[in-house]
């Protein structure tokens, strides 16, 4: 399966035969119209090459096949996290769980812990993600901040 050959309706949450995730992107056509195009991302998924997500998993996990790009923003939405962490999604849709596991990790969160926190206290899980995102932002700002060179000795 080649991402570039997929229609937009099947692009998001698919994995090419190469093992790379497919990504729905937008572009402006010659006449100025916004169009969608399925592209191959650089994100490699181990052990799921050639996977196209089922409609059942898309519905169970609350994801949108028309979503453009890959983002962790939806993890901040309690309704989305509830569906993602539901047994119907978490236990049956390894492709989507793998994607969001890695997105959460990129924000400094552990998806199983986030789901457990959501089950016990949905507000707490959102606080975890919000504080993780803030900490990652603060850390990246601190790392990128200009610093003085050490004085010669």
Image (tube, rainbow, N blue to C red):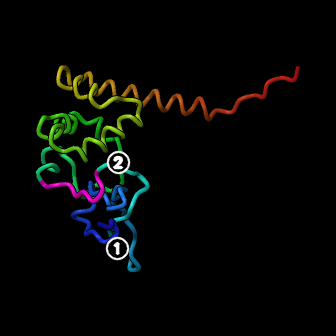
Picture coordinates of residue 28 (x, y %)? 40, 71
Write the residue at 34% across / 58% down. 23
- Give the magenta part as a residue range: 48-55
Nearer-the-camera pick, 4 or 45: 45
Picture coordinates of residue 59 (x, y %)? 13, 49
Magenta-span inclusion, residue 130: no
Question: Does label 2 or label 1 sit earlier along the sequence?
Answer: 1
Left or right for 102, reference 6 = right
Q: Quadrant of residue 91?
A: top left
Write the residue at 84% across / 23% down. 151
Badge 1 element? loop
Asked if residue 107 is positioned above or below residue 125 in the image, the reply reads below
Q: Quadrant of the C terminus?
A: top right
Asked if residue 104 is positioned above or below residue 52 in the image, the reply reads above
User: Which residue is disc 2 drawn over?
Assistant: 46
Left or right for 153, reference 130 = right
Asked if residue 133 is positioned above or below residue 68 in the image, the reply reads above
User: Which residue is disc 1 drawn over?
Assistant: 33
Nearer-the-camera pick, 130 or 111: 111
Badge 2 crowding class, 10 Å Cα cut-off, few under 14, some 14 to 19, many 20 or more, is: few
Write the residue at 28% across / 55% down. 67
Nearer-the-camera pick, 95 or 81: 95
């Amino acid at each position: 399966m080649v991402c570039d050959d997929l229609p937009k309706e099947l692009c998001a949450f698919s994995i090419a035969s190469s093992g790379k995730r497919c990504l729905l992107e937008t572009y402006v056509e010659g006449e100025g119209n916004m169009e969608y195009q399925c592209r191959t991302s650089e994100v490699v998924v181990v052990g799921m090459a050639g996977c196209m997500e089922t409609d059942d998993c898309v519905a169970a996990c609350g994801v949108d096949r028309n979503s453009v790009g890959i983002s962790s923003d939806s993890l901040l939405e309690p309704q989305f996290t509830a569906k993602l962490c539901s047994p119907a999604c978490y236990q049956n849709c390894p492709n989507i769980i793998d994607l969001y596991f890695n997105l959460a990790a990129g924000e400094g969160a552990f998806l199983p812990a986030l789901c457990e926190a959501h089950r016990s206290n949905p507000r707490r899980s959102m606080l975890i993600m919000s504080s993780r995102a803030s900490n990652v932002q603060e850390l990246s700002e601190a790392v990128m901040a200009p610093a003085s060179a050490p004085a010669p000795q």
